[in-house]
Image (cartoon, rainbow, N blue to C red):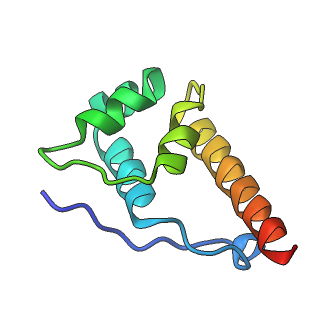
Amino acid sequence: MSLSFQSTVSSSFTQSPPVEPEISRILTAAVINSQFRQMLLANPDRAVETGYAGQKFNLAREDKKCLGAIRATSLADFAFQLNRSLEQRRTNLSFVAGD
């Protein structure tokens, strides 16, 4: 099963770069499969390592850290925390690049 979707982003987020494809695949799997969603919420590291529908997720170490640090009780909260973490990382990278 191949996971792909096109997201619509609200105007308040249009200045941000698009979400990495692997993060999008993980969130898509969580939306369409309740078992994967529960695993992602309970143990994000395990969910990413296990993969979904026979497919593995190829994430950078920093992305794995972001995901693994999230503690959420709903997918909406998970996505919010993930977005905040990724935005913070992008801001830190922009700051370092601007030095």
Where is residue 84 shown, x and y percent of the image?
71, 49
Foreground residue, 15 or 58? 58
Q: Quadrant of the C terminus?
A: bottom right
Residue 75 place in picture, x, y as percent = 52, 38
* Residue furthest out toward the right: 99
Residue name at image x 38 percent, y 59 percent = 22
14 vs 35, left or right, is right
Taking the image as shown, residue 16 lies to the left or right of residue 92, namely left
Name the residue located 58 percent from the left edge and 46 percent from the top edge: 79
Number of marks drawn = 0
Task: State which quadrant residue 78 falls in.
Answer: top right
- As drawn, the residue found furthest toward the front would be 99
**Residue drawn 69% across the image and 73% down it:** 16
- The residue sitting at 30% across, 46% down in the picture is 32
Q: Position of residue 17 (x, y in %)?
A: 62, 75
The relative height of residue 18 versus residue 58 in the rendered view (above or below) is below
Give the quadrant of the N terminus.
bottom left
- Depicted 47 relative to depicted 89: above or below: above
In front here: 63 or 6? 63
Q: Is residue 84 left or right of residue 98?
A: left
Vertical order, 8 against 65 (above or below): below
Residue 33: x percent and y percent? Answer: 28, 39
Write down the quadrant of residue 44 in the picture: top left
Q: Quadrant of residue 70?
A: top right
Name the residue furthest top.
42
